[in-house]
Image (tube, grey):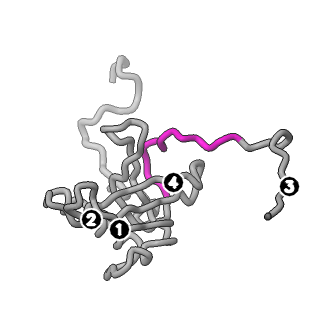
Amino acid sequence: MPSVSFNAATHVAPPAPSREPLPRGMYEVMVIGSDIKSTQAGTGQFIELTLQVAAGEYAGRRVWDRLNVNNPNKTAEEIAKRALQELCLAVGVNNLTDTEQLHDKPLLAEIDIDRKDQSRNRVMGYASLSAAAPTAPAARPAVAPSPSARPAGRPWEKR
């Protein structure tokens, strides 16, 4: 019989991780797991993705997404294929033949609270990390003041 040495009475466990949903926002994530499953009704298939937050305050937290890639409801199927397209483009996979091609590549995911179940998150979209690169605001063209413009000063003072 295998032996082990562990004293449950003296072990000090770290606090349990939060089970609250992540706040709404853009998160750097990676797909760390994927599977293709049949729908409960058996009439279609979905890709189940496990995403892990890769950076920031919530690093290590996980979020799940389900993409109904084969569904009798063609609207649901189109929404899923659009999300899958965003995901593929975000990680640089143009021709997806295996969901593992999506794994371990950093990208951005827009996360929100699920409107049907406030205790869960919902993935709203995907983007490449380069999409988050800060851009300098466009320079505003210099505008010459018009001759009738008021001079600087207090509005109640006479000119």
Residue at image position (41%, 62%) is 49
| Placement of the C terminus among the 4 image quadrants | top left
Label 1 and label 4: CA atoms lie apart by 18 Å
The numbered disc on residue 45 is: 2
Q: Earlier in the sequence, mark 1 or mark 4?
A: 1
> Mark 4 vs mark 2: which is more N-terminal?
2
User: Horizontal and vertical percent for residue 75?
Assistant: 15, 57
Disc ID at residue 36: 1
- Please state if 15 lies on the left or on the right of 6 as rendered: left
Q: Inspect the magenta stretch and tell me whether residue 1 lies in it.
A: no
Tag 1 and tag 2, C-beta contact below 8 Å: yes
- Which region shows up in magenta? 15-28
Q: Secondary structure at mark 1?
A: strand
Assess whether residue 23 is covered by the magenta stretch: yes
Main secondary structure along the magenta-highlighted residues: loop
Q: Secondary structure at mark 2?
A: strand
List the residue tagged with mark 3.
5
Q: Quadrant of the N terminus?
A: bottom right
Instruction: Examine the rendered structure and indicate whether residue 113 appears above or below residue 69.
Output: above
Do callouts 4 and 2 mark residues in contact (Cβ within 8 Å)? no
- Corner quadrant of residue 85: bottom left
